[in-house]
Amino acid sequence: MANERLRAAISAKGETIQSTADHVGVDPKSVERWITTNRTPHRGHRWKAATFLGVDEVYLWPTVEKQAETASTSELVTYYPHRGAVPTSLWSSLIEGATDQVEILVYAGLFLFDSHPDLPDQLAEKATAGTQVRVLLGDPDSQMIRQRGEEEGIGDDLAARARITRRYLEPAAKTPGVEIRLHDTILYNSIYRFDEDVLVNPHVLGAPAGQNPILHFRYIPGARTFRHYMRSFDYAWERGRPS
């Protein structure tokens, strides 16, 4: 039975068997076999094809759903019961080791800059070396910041922290490659992405972010959790405004 979903996805994207094969790095005959014989490609090829076509891997190859679930479970490196349990050395190693992307989504995230006072300079240096740096801070004048401050029992302190973080980042923001935006979204998770590692800090109603757990994920091709959180970052980024 032919894989009509793959055929339709290639067509809908305006691509061809040849262009798909070129992107994935295989012979066009391989892509033809994926379609005509419904052959399931290797994990890395599946992921490249699905990403290229803008669809979910499991949609194109439903039989790999269990494999995708297993891979997603494997993405979880470890769990910390609260943010203070994350070793400072881990934050430092992730920051220092990032070469491709640093992406941060927070309301304030002041703890990170207090514990790493050289972080703005590090971000500027990394951007100069070619690292993409994107930071989303909560708009201190937004209703969402005021509401979250009230829910956490700290009132205007959250807005004040967001302003301080923004001030810390002002010198780095002058460096090409460092982008700072403000957001007014309802933040369900703070996200700290360093290349293929991401630390996710879920927000619990009524509790400050520092009292909530941290989940450490590391990207694995074919899995979905890392990509799921990064899609959330992109969603917020698109709706942010320049600082």
Image (cartoon, rainbow, N blue to C red):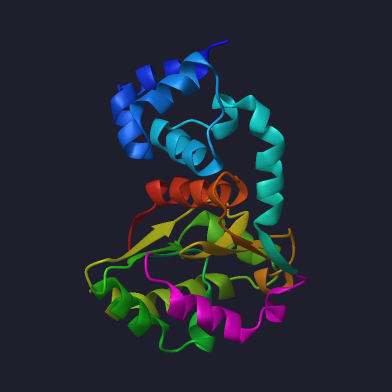
**Which residue corresponds to the image point at 31% horizontal and 22% vertical from the top-left?**
16
Residue 115 left/right relative to 66: left
**Image coords of residue 215 (percent x, y):** 68, 64
In reply to whether residue 132 is colored magenta, the answer given is no
**Which residue corresponds to the image point at 38% horizontal and 46% vertical from the top-left?**
238
**Which residue corresponds to the image point at 48% horizontal and 52% vertical from the top-left?**
233
Near-viewer residue (31 or 197): 31
Near-viewer residue (37 or 19): 37
Residue 106 can be seen in this image: no
**Image coords of residue 190 (percent x, y):** 58, 62
Residue furthest toward the right? Answer: 81
Q: Quadrant of the C terminus?
A: bottom left
Q: Quadrant of the N terminus?
A: top right
Q: Which residues are magenta?
A: 80-100
Q: How many marks?
A: 0
**Which residue corresponds to the image point at 44% horizontal and 34% vertical from the top-left?**
49
Near-viewer residue (75 or 111): 75
Image position of 43 with respect to 150: above or below: above
Image position of 134 with respect to 54: above or below: below
Prevailing secondary structure of the magenta residues: helix
Residue 65 left/right relative to 93: right
**Image coords of residue 139 (percent x, y):** 44, 61
Query: Residue 207 is drawn in which quadrant?
Result: bottom right
Residue 126 left/right relative to 54: left
Query: Residue 117 is drawn in which quadrant?
Result: bottom left
**Image coords of residue 161 (percent x, y):** 51, 76
Residue 74 can be seen in this image: yes
Residue 194 left/right relative to 158: left
